[in-house]
Image (spheres, grey):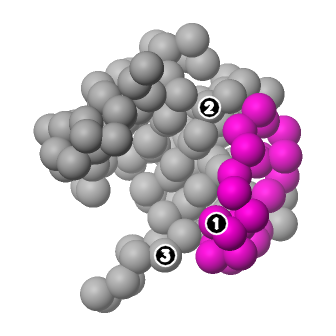
Amino acid sequence: DRLRACVVGPADHADDLLAGREVSAVGVVAAMVSAEAVRPANCEIVYLGRLSLEQQRAVTARMRGAAVLTIAENDPACRSRAMICLLFEAEALSFRLNIDSVANSQVRIDPRVLRLGAGVAP
């Protein structure tokens, strides 16, 4: 089975994901979905682009308790309550992990990944 990734809002770093480059080989298919239409039944991965904090929180609240991985592209402080918040720096990409959001979902993340990310208080 393929994982469905929903890109919500304009995204600066999701072109390859939407074009299917490399991710189709690992079983991920992506599509743009509006913030109002995205639901746990539609997506196993939700990638949040440039949305207001209120819009991001509305989407992550809808995903809470479901088996949906939420990733925020434009939230370095991780206030959206997404599970993973990407940090883009010159020549580097890192991420913050919202442990509370992960714990309140049905998503299980390998402990090795947990050690890579900087934890964020809820």
Residue 75 against residue 21 in the figure, above or below: below
* Magenta-drawn segment: 99-120
Residue picked out by circle 1:
113
Residue kind at label 3, given as amino acid type? Ser
Q: Quadrant of residue 108?
A: top right
Q: Residue at x 74, y 64 (%)?
A: 111
Q: Nearer the viewer, mark 3 or mark 1?
A: 1
Residue kind at label 1, given as amino acid type? Val
Callout 1 environment at 10 Å: few (<14), some (14 to 19), or many (20+)?
A: few
As drawn, the label of residue 94 is: 3
Q: Is residue 78 left or right of residue 37?
A: right
> Could you tell me which secondary element the residue under label 1 belongs to?
helix
Q: Residue at x 45, y 43 (%)?
A: 48
Nearest the viewer among 27 and 35 is 27
Q: Is residue 32 magenta?
A: no
Q: Pick whichever of labels 3 and 1 is earlier in the sequence.
A: 3
Residue picked out by circle 2:
68
Position of the N terminus, as image quadrant, is top left
Nearest the viewer among 38 and 93 is 93
Decide: marks 2, 1 in contact (CB < 8 A)?
no
Q: Is residue 17 left or right of residue 55?
A: left
Position of the C terminus, as image quadrant, is bottom right
